[in-house]
Amino acid sequence: MDFLGIFWNFKQETILLSITVIFLLYIYATRNFKYWSERGIPYFRPIPFVGNLKEVVTFQRNIGFHLKHIYESVKGQPFKGFFIYDQPALMITDLDLLKMIFQKDFQYFVDKGISITKHDKLLGDALFTLKGQLWKEKRTKLSPAFSTSKLKNMYELVDEKANTLIDYLSDFGRLEQPIFVKDLLGRYGTDIVASLAFGIECNSVHDPHADFRENLKYSFLFSKIGALKFIGTFVDLPLLKLWPVKTTSKKVEKYFQKSVWNVVKQRQNPGQQLMRNDYLESLIRIADQFNNSKEHIEENLKIDIVSQAYTFLAAGFETTSSTILFSLYHLAMKSEVQNKLRHEIQEAVEANDGKLSYEVIHSLRYLDMVVSETLRLYPTMPILDRTCTKPFQIPGTNFVVDKGVHIFTSLLGIQRDPDLYPDPENFNPERFSEENKRNRHKFAYMPFGEGPRICIGKRMALMVAKNAISRILLNYEVLPSKHTPSKLEFDVRTFLLTTSHEIPLVFKNLK
Ligand code: HEM
């Protein structure tokens, strides 16, 4: 056979092989697509390989806003099937049904979908990834670290950190120069996490290149493919078993492990009195209490403490700093709300010998209304999910949700639903007056989730956010600059709500 003949045969074989591979992939990717029709459940028609996530996969829409879009298309029906890639999922819009799933019948929906393999040394053991009994045990162990007395003790450290923020703003305040607040609050959030969860004094507010901050920047910094893979973790996408998600690099992983462990070792040294009232101290005490069998001490203890400290960072860092950011943005845009809030804070502080204590922060009604309204418009973790852990019949129907089905609801959908919140895009703290709250379904507002799996850091996040907002308003008038956008755009590469741009604001000295 001449050369041309060999080449021709080779080309034919390659084409045939490629067609066969594509065909087999297609069969595999669409194997579940009859799932909802076979059960007689209405569903959105999926597209091979992407399911119902076309706009997400093509980076036209943030996943949080995409689920809002799905929620709006389902409204009027209590639920509807859709597909996350090739996995069947159920979008629930009915608040009573959500109450059953999240609270009353929680025993059928104990797990969250998110699965991170044990390959991920930092997150493999994080509370939000754990399932069943393992989750229950870990949640019980960790809960004391978030008790009122522990939070009160931590408050001092939080208030101390706010000094650095106020200090930093003072030069800009004198000159009335705009500041990029997203970056600044990211640095502030970094310092809070470093202080509370890692026992490290990182001053990235003043030094943006501080070691801890530089390393943190490389966590959860996904490529486009990485971002799409991470969405797959919500439904435990089988492909991810072969191609696991990595939330950070080996180098950064080592940095965090070493940082935590050095502090733990120092604190365990009886010669050094380095105890602090932080979250890390609670983790060390919890670990000491439970890990007293000799053979299993050092390595397990290390993995456990590092993983829980890192969980704080993964779940609490950006969610909390973005809450402060969105609050300040709306306070700058609505001076009447800002003035009313400042007045409330000033009065309470004056009546408390000039101190903004833990108790004062918690007594401020209007502050609570402002932060609640912020979290209504911007639930920074906008997706709530559960996985069915045993068959559950939806009352009033013949439909039995199978074990393994992923349940979703959209917080942006619910909390911006015009039937629940008239004129939903308008920032109006009065929606959270006692009377208005009383007249609304409890599940119409759940930025921290609901039921036994509600955010474990809720009260800590609120304490940090309320402290920062109050300290800023006591010292500065917050104003928009001429470049402050009137509408916010959101990053399409993350499942958290974070703007894709900076927000410049002016902080004018009050004193
Ligand atoms: C404003 C800030 C925050 C928001 C909006 C937020 C929101 C949420 C939401 C929506 C969930 C899911 C709840 C559910 O499925 O029912 C969650 C879970 C969780 N959050 Fe937060 N969170 C915030 C701050 C924090 C902080 C500071 C921590 C610190 C440790 C934290 C740790 C966690 C953990 C560990 C879980 C998983 C709980 C479990 O599965 O048992 N969060 N959070």
Image: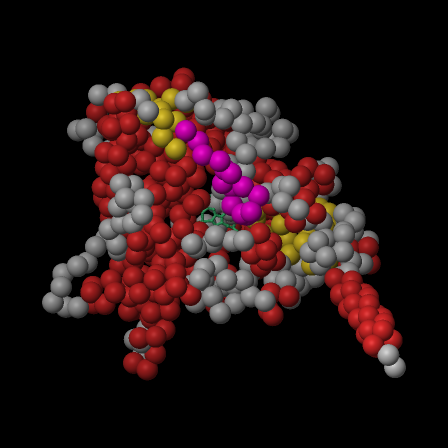
Residue at 55% of width from left, 30% of height from top? 439
Residue 280 lies, in percent from the top left, at 29, 58
In reply to whether residue 503 is colored magenta, the answer given is yes
Question: Where is residue 481, by image quadrant?
Answer: top left
Residue at 32% of width from left, 36% of height from top? 468
Question: Where is residue 183, by image quadrant?
Answer: top left
- Please indicate, yes or no, whether residue 55 appears anywhere in the rendered image: yes
In this rendering, position of residue 349 left or right of residue 223:
left
Residue at 36% of width from left, 65% of height from top? 254
Q: Which residues are magenta?
A: 491-504
In reply to whether residue 180 is colored magenta, the answer given is no
Seen in the picture, residue 186 relative to 137 is either above or below; the reply is above
Q: Give whichever of 343, 101 is nearer the camera.
A: 343
Seen in the picture, residue 243 relative to 424 is either above or below; the reply is below
Q: Give whichever of 38, 490 is nearer the camera.
A: 490
In this rendering, position of residue 438 left or right of residue 298:
right
Task: Check the image and name the residue furthest to the left.
Answer: 271
Residue 497 lies, in percent from the top left, at 51, 41
- Please indicate, yes or no, whether residue 137 appears anywhere in the rendered image: no
Residue at 34% of width from left, 62% of height from top? 255
Kindly report the secondary structure that dominates the magenta region of the rendered protein: loop
- Could you tell me how many numbered marks the image carries? 0
Q: Quadrant of the C terminus?
A: top left
Seen in the picture, residue 290 relative to 32 is either above or below; the reply is below
Residue 225 lies, in percent from the top left, at 59, 55
In this rendering, position of residue 58 left or right of residue 511:
right
Residue 423 lies, in percent from the top left, at 59, 24
Task: Check the image and name the residue furthest to the front.
Answer: 2
